[in-house]
Image: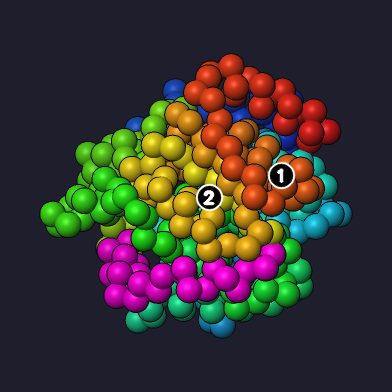
Amino acid sequence: MRGISTIPTVHGSALATLSIILTLVSCATFADETSSHSQLFALALALERSLAGVEPYLVEVDGDTIAYLERPGDGEVVVLVHGFAADKDNWVRFVRHFPTGYRIIALDLPGHGDSSFDSAKLYDATNLTRSLERIFEALGLDQFHLAGHSFGGWITTLYAAQNPDRVLSLSLINSAGVVPPIASELQLRMLDGDNPLLVESSADFERLMDVIFYRQPFLPWPLRPAFARIYVQRAAINRKIWKDLSANLEEVVPLLGKLQMPVLIVWGEHDRVLHVSSVAVYRENLADVRSVVLSDCGHSPIAERPSESAFYVSQFLVGELPSGMQMKTPPSSELDVQFQQSNAEHTR
């Protein structure tokens, strides 16, 4: 069952792009600063979605309103699940580089993004995994490819272990759920009572960006200050969700042996949140696994290296990455150009 469209999305034509640019200029010129920032953010986000070919929808699931983005396609379904304190739009630039034909669904987990939040509910991995099952039922999804980033990788792993017949393949990108052999910078900071993932101010947001990325991706004005405001506004919600997650840490290692579907591990070499040594844990415990470590990349390849990330995941889905394969990409800026060109051909 499809959800209902809630926000008019600009389609990716030259005319639509020109219209957005002219409106951006108009807003920046004539509106007051606060209103201008909000309008510019909404328009810039609409343009990002337009370029990716996705539109926003809502679906009601057990009293919760779940928001998601969808790109139509006649082929297999690919479901994308974001990490802690993130949302569905983290995947937009990734989707832009993903081959057409696949039907893409990027969810806002309960309590995140535009999905509803209820302070009386528990937002731990167990309950969010149960929510995934109900969301997939509401959307009428039977079998699909599943991809999760960070905390999203944790709950997609739990879901795949519980529903192996429904998951065609599993892509885990800098995934939570295992204890890395080498402690990450985030883990060491948290031992001292410091959690950079919880943002209370604009300065905290800048620190978060520094922790998440090795080389921060371009964020056009006014996206950066707008994102900072959103994080600050959601501070209490994110604290509640983090508390729930931390109270019920279910490590996925005992479940990895149940995953008989093909699994792809993608990791940024310089991840300061979840150390790259986690890859070895997945490789040791998965039956059908291949892995790619991205040089010059941090915790969020889907935002920092979207073209390259989309290339590897799409190649995985068509069987081009054999089981057991492991590779590390060379640290070359020319590689980005290579993948953009290769992926452009692949998406035609």
Cα distance in 3D space between marks 2 and 1 = 15 Å
Element class at badge 1: loop
- Residue 109 lies within the magenta run: no
**296 shown above or below 280:** above
Name the image quarter holding residue 100. top right
Mark 1, residue position:
321
Among numbered discs 2 and 1, the one appearing first in the sequence? 2
Which kind of residue does numbered mark 2 sit on?
Ile
Which label sits on residue 84? Answer: none
Q: Looking at the rendering, in which quadrant would you find the N terminus?
A: bottom right
Which kind of residue does numbered mark 1 sit on?
Leu
**120 shown above or below 145:** below
**Image spot of residue 210 (x, y percent):** 31, 36
Residue at image x 62%, y 55%? 289
What residue range appears in magenta?
238-261
**340 shown above or below 232:** above
**Image spot of residue 171 (x, y percent):** 61, 54
